[in-house]
Amino acid sequence: MNVVFVHGFWDTGNVFRRLHRELTAAGHTCFAPTLHPRDGRRGLADLARTLAGCIDHGLPPAAPFAVVGFSMGCLVARYYLQNLRGGRCVPAFFAISGPMRGTATAYLYPGRGARDMRYGSDFLRELNAASPALEGIQLHTYYTPFDLIILPPGSSHLPGVRPTRIGSLLHPWMLTSPQLAADILQKLARLEPAPRPSFKAFVGDDVRRL
């Protein structure tokens, strides 16, 4: 199965290196672009459009792929899937510690991307209004009760989706959790795999809006 990773606030595609390694070892083909600006200062919809360009460039039309988002990247991925009609070829979306309902820490940073992650933002209202576009996609959410970035930790939950609790003590440690990797691998194994890898594996590919 092809897998597209979407990184979080100020991260790069390299943040997924452990997941990338484990999924690749299991036969999956992974693509982890770095989206700019990494703090989303032009808004998360802007990053979602950049993500769409990366996918259009790296994947043949109608090639199936799963999406794995982390933190802010969960919202970027959701916008791509829901508002940019990216979900047509996506059988599953894995959301790791995403501020689905906003987070208090978003008030500590300026910029449009941070404002998009605040409670009740126009961006979140738009996402929630378009949520029926996720129908037909397997949705999986992960959270840690010890999260100090996604506040409250329950903001990582999506309505109607049973969340998976991961015992990571820190927000960034979610991506190094053996429990998380095992669960994603198990769920990917249930999906119908692509017959052949359809693009090269990249980690931290540097992608900028022109």
Image: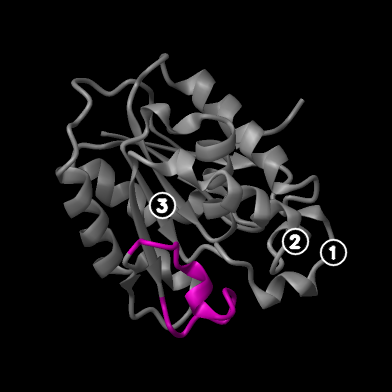
Q: Quadrant of residue 65?
A: top left
* Residue located at (32% from left, 69% from top): 177
Where residue 7 sits in the image (x, y, percent)? 54, 51
Which tag, 3 or 1, sits closer to the chain's start? 3
Where residue 57 sits in the image (x, y, percent)? 53, 19
Number of the label disc, if any, that sits on residue 110 = 1
Tell me the SS state at disc 2.
Answer: helix
Question: Which secondary structure dominates the residues rendered in magenta?
Answer: loop
Quadrant occupied by the N terminus:
top left
Number of the label disc, if any, that sits on residue 17 = 3
Q: Which residues are magenta?
A: 144-161
Q: Residue furthest right?
A: 110
Is residue 50 depicted above or below 139 in this figure?
above
Tell me the SS state at disc 3.
Answer: helix
Mark 2 residue type:
Ala
| Mark 2–mark 1 CB contact (< 8 Å) | yes
